[in-house]
Image: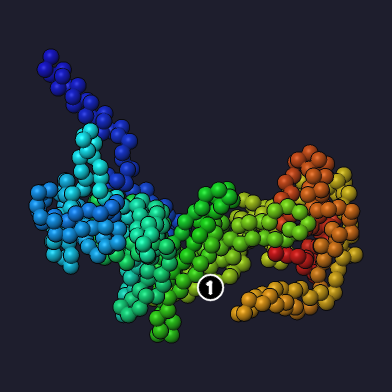
C-alpha cells in the first residue's frame, strides 16, 4: 500500500510539471516570448520589474519597526519623492534619505474587523538600460514604462498606467527624449530598489546587422482600426547612432504605421534592414469611398557596410515578381501610384482574363481615354510655411490623363455607384477596391491597355 501511495505521489508530481500552464509565464523567469522580424535582425527586448511606493495620505516615519517607537518624520503626497522608500520587511518599509536609513513606516494598519488598511500604493514599472558603442562614442538608451500606479506633480495626482518615457544620451548631452512618464523616469531610472525579479517584454526592439547591435526601434500597435488594417505597428520610431564624416550623428525618425510582411517580398541582403512606412493613398477619394489608410508604402533602408551605416529614405517599394504573384491587384494599384508601367503590366497579366466580362458585358462606364489627355498640366501642392500660412505651389507642367475629368463626364455622384454596378454585373466575381478605388482607372481591358501603352501618367496618382 505504501508503495502504491508513493507511486501516485511521483506520478502526480510528474503530471503537474509536464502539463504546467506556467511555462511561458514571464513572471516566473521562464521562457519569454519575444517578437522577431526580418530573420532576427529586429528583436524585441524585455526589462526588469521594479516598484515604488506612494503614501495614500500622511504616514508616520518611526525610529524603529514598532508603533511604540518615536515619530521622527512624516511622508505625504508632497514629499515622498525626496526619499527612497524600500520594501525590505514584511510589514514595514525602510525610509532612506541620501542613502542613509532615517526610519521605518508601517505598510498597513489593522482595523477592528481584522481587515488591513494599506497606507501606500505599490506602483510597478518596467525599465531597461541599454547602450551602443560606436567608435569612441557610447550612446545610452534608458526606458521606463509604468504598469500601474500614480505619481504626484504640482500638487496633483496623475494616473501613470501604461505611460512611458525614454532618453537617448551620451556623456555630455541628452540627444533624444520622448514620453509622458518623465517624473517617474527622473526619480527611478537609476534606482534599483524594490526589484521584483520578474521580466516583462517592452515595446523596444534592438536593430542588429552583421551580428552587431546598431540601434533601436520604439514601436506600439493601437487597437481598433489600426489593428484592423493589418499593420504591425501604428507608432514607430527608429533610432540609429552613426558617424558621418567623422562627426557623430543620431538618426531618429518617426515612421508612424509600418508593415513588415511586405518586406517578405523584397530581396534583402544580410547587411540590410527594411522598414515599410505606410501612408494614406488618397487617389479618387473625392469621388467616393474612404481613404486608403496604411495603403501606400515608402521604404527606409539601413545598410551596415565597412563599419559604416548608410540610411536611404523615402524609397518606392520594389514591385517584385514574388509580390505580383502573391497579390496581383495590390501590386497593380501600387505600380500605378509609383508610375511603374512595366510592373503594372506584369500585375495586370495575372488577372486580365477575369476582366473580359467588363468589356463585353459591363462597359457602361467605358470611354476612350484619348478624350481626357491634358497637356501642360500643372499640379498644385499645398504646404504650411513657418508662420502657419498655407501656400500653393505649382509643379512643373506635364502631360496626363485626367481621370477626375473622366468621371465628371458621367452623371454620377461618386465611384460607389460604379462599384455597385460592377459588383452586380460581374456577380461579385471580381474585387474592385484596388482596381478602381485606388487607381481611378475603369477596369475595362481596352481602357487599361490604352493607358499602359500611352506615354502619359494618370492624375491623380497618390
| In the image: residue 90, left or right of residue 433 | left
- The residue where tag 1 is placed is 312
| Closer-to-camera residue (280/386) | 386
Q: The C terminus appears in which quarter of the rendering?
A: bottom right
The colouring scheme, among rainbow, by chain, secondary structure or one colour, is: rainbow
Q: Is label 1 in a helix, a strand or a loop?
A: strand
| In the image: residue 451, left or right of residue 171 | right
Name the residue located 22 percent from the left edge and 62 percent from the top edge. Answer: 83
Q: On the image, which quarter does residue 442 sit in?
A: bottom right
Name the residue located 49 percent from the left edge and 70 percent from the top edge. Answer: 253
Q: On the image, which quarter does residue 242 sit in?
A: bottom left
Residue 396 appears in view: yes
Residue 347 appears in view: no
Q: On the image, which quarter does residue 207 sit in?
A: bottom left
Give the number of marks.
1
| In the image: residue 166, left or right of residue 383 | left
| Residue sitting at the far top | 1
Name the residue located 64 percent from the left edge and 51 percent from the top edge. Answer: 327
10 Å neighbourhood of mark 1: few (<14), some, or many (≥20)?
Answer: few
Q: The N terminus appears in which quarter of the rendering?
A: top left
Amino acid at each position: 500500500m505504501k508503495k502504491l501511495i508513493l507511486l501516485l505521489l511521483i506520478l502526480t508530481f510528474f503530471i503537474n510539471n509536464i502539463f504546467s500552464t506556467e511555462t511561458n509565464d514571464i513572471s516566473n523567469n521562464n521562457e519569454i516570448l519575444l517578437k522577431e522580424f526580418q530573420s532576427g535582425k529586429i528583436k524585441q527586448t524585455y526589462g526588469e520589474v521594479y516598484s515604488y511606493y506612494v503614501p495614500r495620505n500622511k504616514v508616520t516615519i518611526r525610529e524603529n519597526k514598532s508603533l511604540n517607537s518615536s515619530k521622527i518624520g512624516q511622508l505625504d503626497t508632497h514629499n515622498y519623492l525626496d526619499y527612497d522608500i524600500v520594501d525590505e520587511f514584511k510589514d514595514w518599509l525602510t525610509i532612506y534619505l541620501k542613502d542613509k536609513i532615517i526610519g521605518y513606516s508601517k505598510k498597513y494598519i489593522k482595523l477592528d474587523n481584522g481587515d488591513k488598511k494599506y497606507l501606500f500604493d505599490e506602483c510597478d514599472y518596467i525599465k531597461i538600460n541599454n547602450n551602443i558603442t560606436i567608435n569612441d562614442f557610447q550612446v545610452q538608451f534608458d526606458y521606463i514604462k509604468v504598469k500601474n500606479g500614480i505619481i504626484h506633480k504640482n500638487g496633483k495626482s496623475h494616473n501613470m498606467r501604461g505611460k512611458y518615457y525614454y532618453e537617448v544620451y551620451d556623456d555630455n548631452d541628452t540627444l533624444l527624449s520622448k514620453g509622458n512618464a518623465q517624473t517617474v523616469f527622473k526619480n527611478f531610472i537609476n534606482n534599483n530598489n524594490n526589484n521584483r525579479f520578474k521580466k516583462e517584454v517592452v515595446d523596444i526592439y534592438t536593430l542588429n546587422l552583421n551580428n552587431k547591435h546598431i540601434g533601436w526601434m520604439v514601436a506600439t500597435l493601437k487597437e481598433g482600426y489600426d489593428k484592423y488594417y493589418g499593420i504591425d505597428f501604428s507608432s514607430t520610431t527608429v533610432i540609429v547612432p552613426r558617424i558621418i564624416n567623422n562627426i557623430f550623428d543620431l538618426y531618429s525618425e518617426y515612421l508612424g504605421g509600418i508593415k513588415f510582411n511586405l518586406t517578405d517580398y523584397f530581396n534583402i541582403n544580410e547587411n540590410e534592414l527594411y522598414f515599410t512606412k505606410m501612408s494614406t493613398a488618397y487617389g479618387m477619394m473625392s469621388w467616393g469611398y474612404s481613404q486608403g489608410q496604411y495603403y501606400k508604402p515608402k521604404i527606409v533602408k539601413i545598410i551596415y557596410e565597412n563599419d559604416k551605416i548608410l540610411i536611404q529614405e523615402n524609397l518606392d517599394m520594389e514591385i517584385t515578381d514574388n509580390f505580383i504573384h502573391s497579390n496581383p491587384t495590390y501590386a497593380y494599384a501600387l505600380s500605378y501610384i509609383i508610375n511603374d508601367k512595366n510592373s503594372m503590366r506584369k500585375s495586370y497579366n495575372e488577372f486580365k482574363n477575369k476582366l473580359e466580362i467588363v468589356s463585353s458585358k459591363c462597359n457602361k462606364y467605358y470611354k476612350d481615354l484619348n478624350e481626357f489627355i491634358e497637356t501642360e498640366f500643372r499640379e498644385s501642392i499645398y504646404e504650411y510655411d513657418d508662420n502657419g500660412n498655407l501656400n500653393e505651389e505649382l509643379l512643373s507642367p506635364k502631360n496626363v490623363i485626367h481621370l477626375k475629368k473622366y468621371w465628371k463626364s458621367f452623371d454620377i455622384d461618386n465611384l460607389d455607384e460604379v462599384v455597385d454596378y460592377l459588383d452586380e454585373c460581374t456577380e461579385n466575381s471580381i474585387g474592385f477596391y484596388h482596381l478602381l478605388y485606388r487607381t481611378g482607372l475603369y477596369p475595362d481591358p481596352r481602357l487599361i491597355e490604352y493607358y499602359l501603352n500611352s506615354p502619359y501618367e494618370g492624375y491623380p496618382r497618390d
